[in-house]
Image (cartoon, helix red, strand yellow):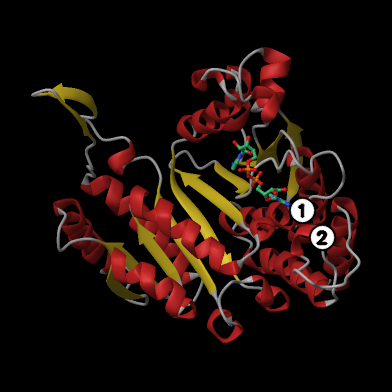
C-alpha cells in the first residue's frame, strides 16, 4: 500500500531543509518497508505568490488525504508588510486548525557532541532527553469571553482559560502513550494551587493514569517546573500541560539544548494526520545560500516515522545517523561554537553525511 505524504516546503530555508529531509525519508521508508508517495504543495509566502493566499483549499484537501505532512517554514521580509490576516503565518495557523492538531510534541535532546552549545554547564545538560507535550487548540489563547473594554474610564482587557474534560483526556493519553515508548515517566505541569482549570486537569490526568499503571506520574507546579528545567533538566522524560504553560516551557526546554537548528516537532490530531516541522523559522538571513542546518527537519522525519508509522526502530536509526554525523565532527555553520576552528558543511552536504551514516547503520 502506498502512503501519501504532503510536503510543504514554504519559504526561506524551508525548501532547502525539507529537500534533505525528503531524501532521508525516502531511504528510511524503504528500510521500514513503507511505500511512500511524496506530493508537493505551497504554503506561506510561496502560496501567496502563486495563489494570492497563504493556504489554498486544494492544499488543505491534499493534506487531509495524506497520512502526514512535512513542513519547512513560512514567512520572510517580502511579506512582512502584508495585513496580519493574509500573512504567511496564517497558512500555518490554518493548516493546524483544519487538521485539528491538538497535541504539539517538542523534544529537547542534547546530543553529546553539541553539549557545549548549551548555556548550562556540561554536567547539567548531560543526558537531557525530554519531550514537552503541549495542548494546542484550547486554553487561554482561545477561551471566550475575551477582548478589551473601557470600564469607568479605564482600559481593561480580559482572556479566559477554559478546558473541558474531553480536551484534557485526549492530550493526556497522547502524553502517556509517548511516555510508554520512552522512559515511562510523565510530569503533569499545573498551577492547581491557584487555578480551577488546573484542578480539573489534576483530576482528569489522575483518571487517565489508571489506564497507564506502567507509567510513573508526577504532578509538578509550573513555577517549580520552570526552575527544575534549568537546575536539573535530565530528571524529566515526558511533560504534559496546557497551551499557555506549554508554550513557555517548550521554548525554555528547547533553549537549554542551545541549538535552534536541531529542534524538531510533531503536531498530532484526531483526524489521524500528523504535521511534522522544524521549530526554527525561515531564516531569511541565510536562505538560498546552502547554509541552513537540515537536522531539525531530518529529526522531524524521525518523529513522523515514530508517531505516524509507529516505526520507532527506523526513527532511531535516523536519530543514530544524525548522532554519528555530529560525533564524526560534521557541523553546519550554526553549530560551530564561538572561538571554535572548524570546517563547516552546507545544507546539502550535511544531508549527504546523514544519508551515508544511515546507510552504514543498515
Ligand atoms: P528564525 O528561526 O528563522 O531564525 C533565527 C536565527 O536562527 C537566524 O539567525 C537564522 O539564520 C538562524 N537559524 C534558524 N534556523 C536555522 C537553521 N536551520 N540553520 C541555520 N541557522 C538557522 O527566526 P526569525 O529570524 O525570528 O524569523 C524569520 C522568519 O521566520 C519570520 O518571517 C518569522 O515570522 C518566521 N518564522 C516561522 C516559523 C515557522 O514557520 N514555524 C517559526 C518562527 C519564525
**Residue 235 appears anywhere in the view:** yes
Residue 176 appears in the rendering: no
Disc 1 residue lies near ligand 1 with CB under 8 A: yes
Taking the view exactly as shown, the residue that stands out farthest to the bottom is 123
Q: Which mark is residue 38?
A: none
- Which image quarter holds the N terminus? top right
Q: Is residue 82 above or below residue 106?
A: above
* Element marked by disc 2: loop
Q: Position of residue 202 (x, y in %)?
A: 21, 62
Q: Position of residue 323 (x, y in %)?
A: 75, 72
**In the image shown, does 283 or 176 lie closer to the viewer?**
283
Verify CB contact (< 8 Å) between mark 2 and mark 1.
yes
Task: Write down the quadrant of residue 31 in the picture.
Answer: bottom right
Q: Is residue 40 left or right of residue 243?
A: right
Q: Residues within 10 Å of mark 1 (few under 14, many from 20)?
A: many
Which residue is nearer to you in this view: 221 or 133? 221
The residue labelled by disc 2 is: 332
User: As displayed, is residue 195 above or below residue 215?
Assistant: above
Front of the two marks 2 and 1: 2
Marked residue nearer the N-terminal end (2 or 1)? 1
Which residue lies at the image location 70% right of the left edge and 67% below the top edge?
319
Is label 1 in a helix, a strand or a loop?
Answer: loop
Q: Quadrant of the C terminus?
A: bottom right
**What whole-number distance in Å separates the C-alpha atoms at marks 2 and 1?**
9 Å
Number of numbered discs: 2
Residue that label 1 marks? 294
Question: Residue sitting at 66 percent across and 18 percent down?
Answer: 48
Q: Quadrant of residue 140?
A: top left
Ligand 1 - quadrant of the structure image: top right
Say above or below: 193 vs 35: below
Label 2 within 8 A of ligand 1 by Cβ = yes
Q: Residue at x 60, y 22 (%)?
A: 55
Amino acid at each position: 500500500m502506498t502512503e501519501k505524504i504532503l510536503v510543504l516546503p514554504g519559504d526561506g530555508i524551508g525548501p532547502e531543509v525539507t529537500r534533505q529531509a525528503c531524501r532521508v525519508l525516502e531511504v528510511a521508508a524503504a528500510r521500514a518497508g513503507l511505500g511512500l508517495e511524496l506530493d508537493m504543495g505551497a504554503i506561506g509566502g510561496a502560496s501567496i505568490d502563486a495563489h494570492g493566499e497563504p493556504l489554498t483549499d486544494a492544499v488543505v484537501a491534499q493534506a487531509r488525504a495524506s497520512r502526514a505532512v512535512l513542513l519547512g517554514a513560512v514567512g520572510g521580509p517580502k511579506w512582512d508588510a502584508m495585513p496580519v490576516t493574509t500573512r504567511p503565518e496564517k497558512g500555518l495557523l490554518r493548516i493546524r486548525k483544519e487538521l485539528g492538531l491538538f497535541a504539539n510534541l517538542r523534544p529537547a535532546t542534547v546530543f553529546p557532541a553539541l553539549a557545549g552549545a548549551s548555556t548550562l554547564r556540561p554536567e547539567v545538560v548531560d543526558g537531557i532527553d525530554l519531550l514537552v507535550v503541549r495542548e494546542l487548540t484550547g486554553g487561554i489563547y482561545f477561551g471566550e469571553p475575551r477582548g478589551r473594554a473601557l470600564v469607568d474610564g479605564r482600559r481593561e482587557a480580559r482572556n479566559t482559560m477554559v478546558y473541558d474534560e474531553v480536551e484534557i483526556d485526549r492530550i493526556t493519553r497522547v502524553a502517556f502513550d509517548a511516555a510508554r515508548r520512552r522512559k515511562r515517566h510523565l510530569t503533569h505541569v499545573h498551577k492547581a494551587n491557584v487555578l480551577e482549570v488546573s484542578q480539573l486537569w489534576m483530576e482528569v490526568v489522575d483518571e487517565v493514569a489508571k489506564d497507564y499503571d506502567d507509567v510513573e506520574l508526577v504532578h509538578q507546579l509550573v513555577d517549580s517546573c520552570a526552575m527544575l528545567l534549568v537546575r536539573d533538566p535530565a530528571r524529566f522524560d515526558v511533560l504534559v500541560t496546557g497551551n499557555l504553560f506549554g508554550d513557555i516551557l517548550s521554548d525554555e526546554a528547547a533553549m537549554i539544548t542551545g541549538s535552534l537548528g536541531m529542534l524538531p516537532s510533531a503536531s498530532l490530531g484526531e483526524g489521524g494526520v500528523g504535521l511534522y516541522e522544524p521549530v526554527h523559522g525561515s531564516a531569511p538571513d541565510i536562505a538560498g545560500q546552502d547554509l541552513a542546518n537540515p537536522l531539525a527537519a531530518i529529526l522531524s522525519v524521525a518523529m513522523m516515522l515514530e508517531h505516524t508509522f509507529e516505526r520507532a526502530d527506523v526513527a532511531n536509526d535516523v536519530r543514530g545517523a544524525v548522532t554519528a554525523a555530529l560525533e564524526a565532527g560534521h557541523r553546519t555553520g550554526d553549530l560551530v561554537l564561538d572561538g571554535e576552528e572548524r570546517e563547516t558543511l552546507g545544507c546539502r552536504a550535511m544531508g549527504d553525511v546523514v544519508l551515508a551514516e544511515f546507510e552504514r547503520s543498515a
